[in-house]
Image (cartoon, rainbow, N blue to C red):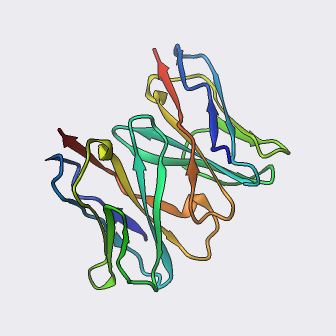
């Protein structure tokens, strides 16, 4: 079955802009979580959605937001981009959070 | 509090050598899960194994093997006869059983493994 699909794979933005990233989970997976990965901070949990409801949120500013649609697809948005937001953003889906299944990520560069 | 430590930041070996990646965890819970993930250059984390705290049997899958020792709170990963395709960043992770939330999965900082031809 198809894996987790993230779009776009690469994008370049400038400071102050906003960005929306998309994640399509594995069919049948209702839980979608997002992570930010940077060389300095490693993998950091952003938020998790289950059945269109945000279940948990990591320690990130309000500029980071997300949502989940009825088909379990999820989007995350980062507004007023800062240089430090440059990172690989990973989406993962799961059935009941034992194993997480990750997408290839969206690599964001902020100039 | 839970914590996962991967003390080896980077490891480089020559192809066909055996290599062990260390993982030490901390938790006061008696029921938990341990994971290993592989992150190749393409970016996605690939699930390798899950082990629950009550199952200390070592596991072997082809060239991969895992050694879980509760006495030392370690869950080490060995690659036998390494290959260039094994080059990746490997993450060890811990989650507490009963918490069905990704926010409760604690990842280590990762070990970058480079296999030289």
Image quarter for residue B93? bottom left
Image quarter for residue B100? bottom right
Looking at the picture, tell me which residue is in the foreground, A71 or B105: A71
Where does the image place residue A21, in percent across and percent down from the top left?
64, 30
Q: Which residue is drawn at the image coordinates 48% and 19% (left, top)? A: A110
Q: How many labels does the image show?
A: 0
Q: Is residue B34 above or below residue B39?
A: below
Q: Which residue is drawn at the image coordinates 48% and 50% (left, top)? A: B46
Q: Is A91 on the left-hand or right-hand side of B53? A: right
Image quarter for residue B40? top left
Q: Which residue is drawn at the image coordinates 56% and 61% (left, top)? A: A99
Looking at the picture, tell me which residue is in the foreground, A93 or A15: A93
Where does the image place residue B25, in percent across and percent down from the top left?
35, 70
Q: Is B83 on the left-hand or right-hand side of B107? A: left
**Looking at the rendering, in which quadrant would you find the C terminus of chain A?**
top left
Looking at the picture, tell me which residue is in the foreground, B103 or A79: B103
Where does the image place residue A74, in percent across and percent down from the top left?
72, 40
Looking at the picture, tell me which residue is in the foreground, B80 or B70: B80
Where does the image place residue A22, in percent across and percent down from the top left?
68, 32
């Amino acid at each position: 079955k198809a894996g987790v699909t993230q779009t776009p794979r690469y994008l370049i933005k400038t400071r102050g802009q906003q960005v929306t990233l998309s994640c399509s989970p594995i069919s049948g997976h209702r839980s979608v979580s997002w992570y930010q990965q940077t060389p300095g901070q490693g993998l950091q949990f952003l938020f998790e959605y289950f059945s269109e409801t945000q279940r948990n949120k990591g320690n990130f500013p309000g500029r980071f937001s997300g949502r989940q649609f009825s088909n379990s697809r999820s989007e995350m948005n980062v507004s007023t981009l800062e240089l430090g937001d440059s990172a690989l953003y990973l989406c993962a889906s799961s059935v009941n959070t034992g194993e997480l299944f990750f997408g290839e990520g969206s690599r964001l560069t902020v100039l | 509090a839970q914590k996962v430590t991967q003390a080896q930041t980077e490891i480089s070996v020559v192809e066909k050598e055996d290599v062990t990646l260390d993982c030490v965890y901390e938790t006061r819970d008696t029921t938990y899960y341990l994971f290993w993930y592989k992150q190749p250059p393409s970016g996605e984390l690939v699930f390798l194994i899950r082990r629950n705290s009550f199952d200390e049997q070592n596991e072997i899958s082809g060239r991969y093997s895992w050694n879980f020792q509760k006495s030392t709170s370690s869950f080490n990963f060995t690659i036998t006869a390494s290959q260039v395709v094994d080059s990746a960043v490997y993450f060890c992770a811990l989650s507490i059983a009963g918490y069905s939330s990704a926010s409760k999965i604690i990842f280590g900082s990762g070990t970058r493994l480079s296999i030289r031809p």
